[in-house]
Amino acid sequence: MIAAAQPDSLPTPSFDEIAPAVWAWVQPDGSWWINNTGVIAGDDGDVIVDTCATAQRTQAFLRARRRAHRSDTPIRFALNTHQHGDHTYGNSQLPESTVIIGQRHMRAGLATDTVICGCPPFWEPVPQWGDVSLRLPSVSFDRSMELHLGDRIVELHHPGYTAHTTGDAVAWLPAERVLFAGDLVFNGVTPLAFMGSLTGALQSLDWLREFDAEIIVPGHGPVIERSGIDDALEAIADYYRYVQNAGQQGYLLGMTPLDAARTAGLGDYAAMPDAERLVLNIHRHYADMSGTELDIIAAFADAVSFNGGPMTSNL
Ligand SMILES: [Zn+2]
């Protein structure tokens, strides 16, 4: 395990070899903007899975990669599992020669991102990204593609529908049975589907089960080994069903999404990091029910109200 600098209040990130020459960079505590990434090494270069929100965290990840194995190994490919900044803003810290890959809706989504130019004050302290600029994938795909690193195969798959976002992708190592699931899986952190679909996010959990993985690297939270996978996926499904029930009751009674969240309360999820995401997820349910676009700014403003102040950022 290799540690890197981290705010005093948080444990250090870990860079653990989860299969031969496959590593997971897990950043505690996995809450807002603090994601996981991965490295898959081959004979002639690496694939990395995602970058981080800030230049500093991305550089810490890249240093851990260099220390863990041959330091001169090029990063040939980088997969962005989805468009969100905690997985993509560090793209610009990668070498020019690295080919960045994303599902085509992911690329289109990141192309419209404005938060990279300055984060709105919905979090405290307000996140500072550092020296990053918008860098889009130069290769996009629709449903699946394969990367070949010598004898090692890395499959990239999109579920075929909107789930956490419109352009989610997982990296699957069929020989090692390791699945980098991006934010289709949150482990011990409140799940989020406000820019996607609650029904799609639920459906994607069944799709993930079909991989029959030995190890899942979630987008946030600790790595999940085989014995824990069923329970972890079921816990996420339970949460999304809770959101749907809470949202549907409020929607039928004509409540605002914020009032629906306040009426339902956090239930069993009160102690989970980022519990205020309930409001964002209920906004998603309302948008789906009414067939309207989700107003992202209004949804975040409601989440801040529900939280009683800006949300936590430990960047
Ligand atoms: Zn994320």
Image (spheres, helix red, strand yellow):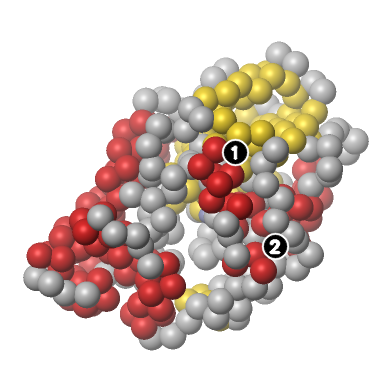
Question: Is 283 displayed left or right of 42 in the figure?
Answer: left
Q: Name the residue under label 1.
A: 102
Query: From this viewpoint, which residue is outermost toward the top?
Result: 151
Of 109 and 66, the residue lying toward us: 109
Q: Name the residue under label 2.
A: 54
Amino acid type at mark 1: Gly
Name the N-terminal-most of marks 2 and 1. Answer: 2
Q: Using the image, determine if residue 215 lies above or below residue 271.
A: above
**Residue drawn at (52%, 65%) of the image:** 32
User: In x, y percent, where is residue 21?
Assistant: 71, 29
Of 220 and 11, the residue lying toward us: 220
What distance separates the C-alpha of mark 2 from that of mark 1?
19 Å
Query: From this viewpoint, which residue is outermost toward the right?
Result: 72
Amino acid type at mark 2: Thr
Taking the image as drawn, is residue 216 in sight?
Answer: yes
User: In x, y percent, where is residue 124?
Assistant: 56, 81
Q: Depth-wise, is mark 2 or mark 1 nearer the camera?
A: 1
Quadrant (top left, top right, bottom left, bottom right) of the C terminus: bottom right
Q: Does the beta carbon of the residue at mark 2 sit less than 8 Å from ligand 1?
A: no
Circles 2 and 1 in contact, beta carbons < 8 Å: no
Question: Is 291 displayed left or right of 124 in the figure?
Answer: left
Q: Using the image, determine if residue 56 lies above or below residue 305.
A: above
**Residue drawn at (30%, 65%) of the image:** 283
Of 123 and 165, the residue lying toward us: 165
